[in-house]
Image: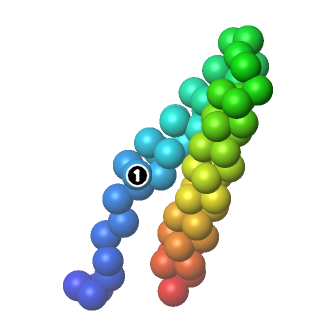
């Protein structure tokens, strides 16, 4: 099985941690509308990247 790629899940863990930190910030800090929208956009982008990585890892595991 020398041809199997090794997947580093540290990127996925970092994305999850960043996303959770932003969600906690949204819940706990009062902010202006523009800041809230920027943070919500970052959360959406991180969520999409997380889903992309999870699908890639899942697909690699099933092969």
Closer to the camera in the image, 31 or 12: 31
The residue carrying pointer 1 sits among few (fewer than 14), some (14 to 19) or many (20 or more) residues within 10 Å by Cα, namely few
Label 1: state its secondary structure: helix
| Colouring convention used in this rendered image of the protein | rainbow
Q: Position of residue 14 (x, y in %)?
A: 44, 42
Relative to residue 38, is residue 54 depicted above or below? below
* Residue nearer the viewer, 11 or 34: 34
57, above or below 3, in the image: above
**Residue, x 50% and y 45% (percent of image)?**
15
Does residue 23 appear in this view? no
Name the residue beneath numbered marker 1: 11
Left or right of 34? Residue 11 is left
Residue occupying the far left of the picture: 2
Asked if 3 appears above or below 52 in the picture, the reply is below
Tell which of 53 and 4 is nearer to you: 53
**x, y percentage for residue 13?**
47, 44
Q: Is residue 30 left or right of residue 51?
A: right
Measuring 66% from the left and 27% from the top, which residue is drawn there?
A: 35
Rendered view: 62 above or below 49: below
- Asked which quadrant contains residue 48, the reply is bottom right
Q: Is residue 29 visible?
A: yes
Residue at 51 percent of width and 69 percent of height: 57
Image quadrant where residue 36 sits: top right
Q: Residue at x 51, y 86 (%)?
A: 63
In this picture, residue 38 sits left or right of residue 2: right
- Check the picture and name the quadrant holding the N terminus: bottom left
**What percent of the width, then of the height, locates residue 55?**
60, 70
- Give the image location of residue 30, x and y in percent: 73, 12
């Amino acid at each position: 099985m020398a041809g199997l790629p090794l997947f580093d899940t540290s990127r996925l863990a970092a994305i999850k941690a960043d996303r959770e930190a932003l969600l906690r910030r949204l819940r706990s800090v009062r902010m202006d509308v523009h800041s809230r929208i920027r943070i919500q956009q970052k959360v959406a982008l991180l969520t999409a990247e997380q889903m992309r990585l999870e699908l890639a890892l899942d697909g690699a595991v099933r092969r």
